[in-house]
């Protein structure tokens, strides 16, 4: 029991008060997702809320024709605002979420999410901060779509993916994946990447992009 409590104190020290950590220890479930595995799917009910410890979760929105688009990423100490909203209002999920890389997280049942909002100020602040971060992320996405050309959006996406997966200048991905996240075709992305390579912005290899 003390070992489990030490785990929560190590990961959430300074974020939540001791009494809340004790409840997290009691009700939390540790999960690991391999790359490509789903945390949630659109159209399903969400019964728990995750907090990401390590790794990256990709949040995607799907239209009526099945075309997906990237909304934002979740990484260390992030939670999903959509999960919180759906849990608190008993709504079905409008988004899908799956692991970009191997991801470790703690998941908490939706009943406790609501109870802790009234019981612990630190949890309420965490929820509000989560909403603010996701709102800022969505504004960034909207601005990128509204005001940037597709080549600029592509470069922005590549830089964002590099940042959330380690911060180096190398990204391992496919043209198909980039196209899905931008809600465009693979052919368009491939053409833009070649143009960016030609003007010295990046270097292309098989399933690999290196920024200059």
Image (spheres, rainbow, N blue to C red):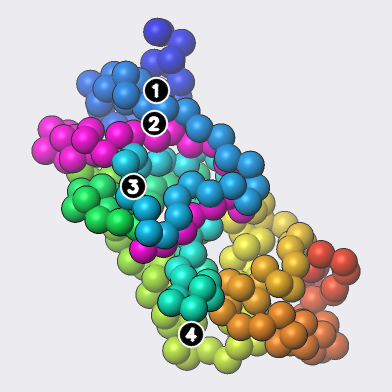
Q: Is residue 122 visible?
A: no
Kindly indicate the quadrant of the structure image that contains residue 157: bottom right
The region drawn magenta spans 94-121
Whether residue 36 sits left or right of residue 3 in the image: it is right
Q: Tag 2, which secondary structure?
A: helix
Separation (CA) of disc 1 from disc 3: 26 Å
Give the left or right position of residue 127, taking residue 40 as reference: left
The residue lying at 32 percent from left, 41 percent from top is: 47
Q: Is residue 189 above or below residue 54?
A: below
Q: Quadrant of the C terminus?
A: bottom right
Q: For mark 2, what is the residue?
A: 12
Q: CA distance from mark 4 to mark 2?
A: 35 Å
Asked which secondary structure carries label 3, the reply is loop
Please indicate, yes or no, whether residue 178 appears anywhere in the rendered image: yes
Compare residues 107 and 162 and report the one nearer the observer. Answer: 107
Question: Circle 1 is placed at which residue position?
Answer: 9
Reading the image, the residue beneath label 3 is 46
Front label number (1 vs 3)? 3
Q: Quadrant of the N terminus?
A: top left
Q: Position of residue 34 (x, y in %)?
A: 63, 42
Compare marks 1 and 3 and give the one earlier in the sequence.
1
Name the spot of residue 171 as percent of width and height, x first.
Answer: 74, 62
Please say if the residues under marks 4 and 2 sit with CB atoms less than 8 Å apart: no
Classify 10 Å Cα crowding around label 4: few (below 14), some (14-19), many (20 and above): some
Q: Decide: marks 2, 1 in contact (CB < 8 A)?
A: yes
Whichever of labels 1 and 4 marks the residue nearer the N terminus, that label is 1
């Amino acid at each position: 029991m003390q070992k489990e409590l030490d785990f929560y104190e190590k990961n959430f020290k300074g974020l939540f008060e001791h009494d809340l950590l004790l409840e997290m220890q009691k009700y939390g479930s540790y999960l690991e997702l391999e790359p490509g595995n789903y945390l949630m799917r659109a159209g399903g009910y969400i019964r728990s809320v995750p907090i990401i410890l390590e790794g990256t979760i990709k949040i995607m929105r799907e239209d009526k024709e099945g075309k997906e688009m990237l909304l934002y990423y979740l990484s260390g100490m992030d939670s999903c605002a959509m999960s919180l909203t759906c849990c608190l209002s008993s709504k079905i999920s409008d988004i899908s979420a799956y692991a970009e890389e191997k991801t470790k997280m703690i998941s908490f049942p939706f009943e406790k999410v609501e109870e802790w909002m009234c019981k612990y100020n630190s949890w309420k602040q965490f929820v509000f901060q989560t909403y603010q971060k996701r709102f800022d992320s969505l504004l960034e996405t909207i601005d990128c779509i509204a005001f940037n050309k597709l080549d600029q959006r592509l470069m922005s996406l590549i830089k964002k993916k590099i940042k959330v997966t380690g911060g180096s200048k190398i990204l391992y991905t496919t043209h198909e994946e980039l196209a899905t996240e931008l809600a465009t075709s693979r052919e368009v992305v491939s053409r833009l990447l070649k143009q960016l390579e030609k003007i010295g912005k990046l270097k292309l290899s098989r399933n690999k992009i290196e920024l200059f």
